[in-house]
Image: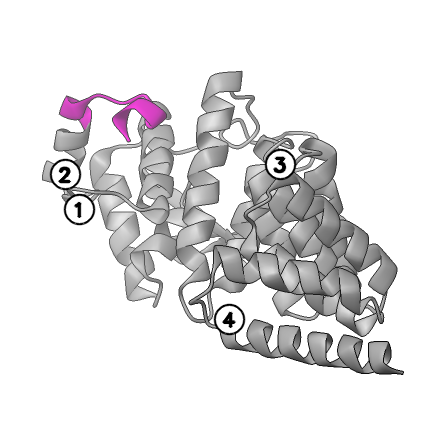
């Protein structure tokens, strides 16, 4: 964490003693975001007392600590004050007084800055890890999507972020958006088996069986032991009437994952296919 943010252990210890950040043995993405914001505020010479009191004021307004850190901004005209920006309005935390935002011709120096390439990649990874941590929390998937978008903004070539963002859209039934992000991941990484598999799922859901079969086939070509891809490919082939081709993938799935949750279904499909083939041979 110290390496990613470029801060010293002594500075972190000082922030902990000042009550600006709780002591931690390990850090999650949201805490890394808070530390990055704290580093920026101290660079702008905002006093530790003002930061601490502003955080306390935000928490009294009903925000949790993660939300409070996300909304802190330095007041350009008075370094002892902090402000939040919400719904297009800027509010001084201590007084609650509403202020007009800066004109577009005068961009805020704190927000508009370019990161060196290595730092940009590190920050993109930080946003990605934060988004992953949010996906497992009920009601936090919208925020996870925002974090993935921030990751892609910093590093457009982050294929895993595009995949995960596509999957968030997929689970919401937004198949067009999901397909767009899966195809974006493949533009970044043309040999990404997971992207072909996820794309196959979208194509199957949107009733494009031939394209789905092509996507699943590419996934198993790139990763021969991809059990789920063999399973979905067999299903797609079955639905399109290509039973003989499906049979090979049912068997391959059982070789890879013979005790998985869908193994019994795969065995039944093999038995049915063999039975139907035998009946045809008798005729």
| Earlier residue among tags 4 and 2 | 2
User: Residue at point 73% right, 45% down?
Assistant: 218
* Residue 91 position in % (x across, y down): 47, 53
Q: Is residue 10 magenta?
A: yes
User: Residue at point 45% right, 22% down?
Assistant: 119
Nearest-to-viewer mark from 4 and 1: 4
| Earlier residue among tags 1 and 2 | 2
Q: Quadrant of residue 114?
A: top right
276 sits left or right of 54 in the view: right
**Which residue bears the numbered disc 3?**
153
* Residue 220 position in % (x across, y down): 65, 47
Q: Secondary structure at mark 3?
A: helix
| Earlier residue among tags 4 and 3 | 3
Is 62 drawn above or below residue 33 in the view shown? below
Q: Is residue 75 visible?
A: no
153 sits left or right of 59 in the view: right
User: Residue at point 51% right, 57% down?
Assistant: 255
**Which residue bears the numbered disc 1?**
22
Q: Is the C-beta separation of discs 1 and 2 under 8 Å?
A: yes
| Earlier residue among tags 1 and 3 | 1
Packing grade of label 4 (10 A; few <14, some 14-19, many >=20) is some
Q: Please report the bounds of the magenta region as a residue range.
A: 1-11
**Which residue bears the numbered disc 4?**
263
235 sits left or right of 117 in the view: right
Q: CA distance from mark 2 to mark 3?
A: 31 Å
Nearest-to-viewer mark from 4 and 2: 4
Q: Is residue 255 magenta?
A: no
């Amino acid at each position: 964490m110290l390496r990613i943010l470029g801060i010293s252990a002594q500075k972190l210890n000082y922030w902990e003693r000042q009550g600006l950040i709780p002591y931690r043995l390990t850090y999650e993405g949201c805490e890394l975001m808070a530390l990055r914001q704290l580093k920026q505020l101290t660079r702008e010479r905002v006093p530790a007392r003002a930061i601490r009191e502003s955080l306390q004021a935000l928490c009294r307004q009903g925000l949790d600590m993660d939300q409070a850190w996300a909304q802190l901004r330095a007041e350009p005209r008075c370094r002892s004050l902090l402000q939040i920006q919400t719904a297009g309005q800027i509010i001084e935390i201590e007084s609650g007084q509403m202020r007009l935002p800066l004109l577009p011709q005068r961009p805020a120096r704190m927000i508009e800055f370019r990161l060196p390439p290595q730092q940009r990649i590190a920050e993109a990874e930080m946003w990605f890890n934060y988004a992953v941590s949010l996906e497992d929390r009920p009601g936090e998937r919208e925020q996870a999507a925002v974090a993935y978008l921030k990751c892609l903004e910093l590093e457009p070539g982050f294929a895993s972020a595009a995949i995960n963002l596509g999957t968030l859209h997929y689970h919401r039934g937004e198949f067009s958006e999901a397909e767009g992000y899966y195809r974006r991941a493949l533009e970044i990484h043309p040999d990404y088996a997971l992207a072909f598999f996820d794309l196959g799922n979208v194509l199957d859901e949107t009733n494009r069986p031939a394209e789905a079969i092509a996507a699943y086939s590419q996934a198993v070509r790139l990763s021969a032991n991809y059990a789920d891809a063999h399973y979905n490919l067999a299903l797609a082939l079955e639905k399109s009437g290509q039973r003989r081709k499906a049979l090979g993938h049912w068997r391959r799935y059982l070789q890879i994952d013979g005790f998985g949750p869908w193994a019994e279904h795969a065995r039944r499909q093999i038995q049915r296919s063999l039975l139907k083939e035998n009946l045809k041979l008798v005729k």
